[in-house]
Amino acid sequence: MSAFIEAASPHTMNTYGRLPIALSHGQGCRVWDVNGKQYLDALAGIAVNTLGHNHPEFAPALQDQIGKIIHSCNYFHVPNAEVLAAKLVELSGMTNVFFCNSGLEANEAAIKLARKFGHDKGIKNPKIVVYEKAFHGRSIATLSATANVKLQQGFGPMLEGFVRVPLNDIEALKKATVNDPDVVAVFFETIQGEGGVNPMRADYLRDVRALCDQQDWLLMIDEVQCGIGRTGKWFAHQWAGIVPDVMPLAKGLGSGVPIGAVVAGPKAANIFQPGNHGTTFGGNPLAMRAGVETIRIMEKDGLLDNAARLGTHFHDQLTAALGGLQGIKEIRGQGLMIGIEFDRPCGVLLKQAADAGLIINVTADTVVRLLPPLIMTTAEADEVLGILLPLIKAFLAEQA
Ligand SMILES: *Cc1c(COP(=O)(O)O)cnc(C)c1O
């Protein structure tokens, strides 16, 4: 641990269990710390750095934008906001977009949309169905929608108006909502991220879509982590052939520049009227340029196909090396959103991997999570596996 790192945070609040590492710069899927040590990046800043680091087209585009205008405020039109919104509409099959700055803000806007949808129908105390193990953010509203009581501890009272159900159980959803005329929306992640890389099944997604149509509820799908090409489709729910009514986005949309978006279909596009919602930074020229360039480069370089192909490669290699081993519960996920679940806490792997020059993540205590940049090559994926697999095998051996 270098002296610089220890001295670096006496004045920032103690909110994170950080590794004793400060990253200084990056190139592609590699990053270097302030002491010059190199790491392979299989986390991408938690599914944020879609295009890796210092991308040869993305970085100059941002520099160009900074030299023109960074922020103008929402008293004025931002031309690239229309370009990015049109693109998101085209890719999602939905109709209108509201821009904000983060995942929780996008989810907060979705919750407000659902509540106003209810009020517009005369429902005074609208309820939203949310899920076990869900993570939607750290504001009071999104924390209330989040399942993890440890995160909620000390911040009560949580907001009312949420009904919680288990994943992938349509009968449980029906049972929890039957005789409840106050339900207005169903809200979930297609693949839960922080909750441990837990996918919703395609048939379940289609059943929920049908139920929402039948009941006139909004289907709201949090694609903050699993969206923007990570699973090999623009949005993970597209694997099930459905279209939601409301879709919060953030993380990967700006390749590192803070950005959030709520995409709405016809049922939700006109709920907000002037004065109903807003933000100072949201949709600013720098973030909008970042979003436009991210999607342009993803399309040009075929990064969805790369994510799908490399995801299969990871899955096959991980299954061949670890499948059936004592201590491995499941290898799951889609595309470049990969979870390896152990039968015991595996947090020590985080530091061991970092020491070995690899950045990964552990979530829900027992799940190693890989979220590499979508530009990763097969050779780099094999390098990730070459570091990670021996660490996992040693971890399993020593704990057996
Ligand atoms: C990260 C995340 C959020 C919160 O996003 P922030 O930008 O940290 O507020 C919400 N939902 C999901 C699914 C996430 O992964």
Image (spheres, rainbow, N blue to C red):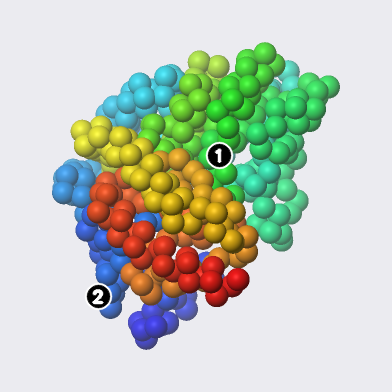
Question: Tag 2's secondary structure?
Answer: loop
Q: Quadrant of the C terminus?
A: bottom right
Residue type at numbered disc 1 = Pro
Which residue is disc 1 drawn over?
199
Q: Is residue 95 above or below residue 99?
A: above
Tally of marks: 2
Q: Residue 173 at what x, y percent from top left?
A: 73, 29
Dividing the picture into quadrants, the one containing residue 37 is bottom left
Q: Residue 222 at what x, y percent from top left?
A: 53, 36
Q: Is residue 88 above or below residue 225?
A: above
Which is nearer the N-term, disc 2 or disc 1? Answer: 2
Dividing the picture into quadrants, the one containing residue 214 is top right
| Residue at 80% across, 27% down | 175
Judged left or right of residue 110, residue 393 is left
| Residue at 38% across, 31% down | 234
Residue type at numbered disc 2 = Gly
Judged left or right of residue 77, residue 162 is right
Q: Residue 285 at what x, y percent from top left?
A: 29, 39
Q: Classify mark 2: residues with Cα within 10 Å, few (<14), some (14-19) or many (20+).
A: few
How many angstroms separate mark 2 from mark 1 (CA)? 38 Å
Question: Tag 1's secondary structure?
Answer: strand
Of residue 333 and residue 183, the one placed in the foreground of this image is 333
Q: Is residue 228 above or below residue 55?
A: above
Examine the rendering and report whether any part of residue 245 can be seen. yes
Q: Residue 369 at what x, y percent from top left?
A: 48, 55
Examine the rendering and report whether any part of residue 107 can be seen. no
| Residue at 59% across, 61% down | 327
Which residue is disc 2 drawn over?
36
Q: Is residue 129 above or below residue 25?
A: above
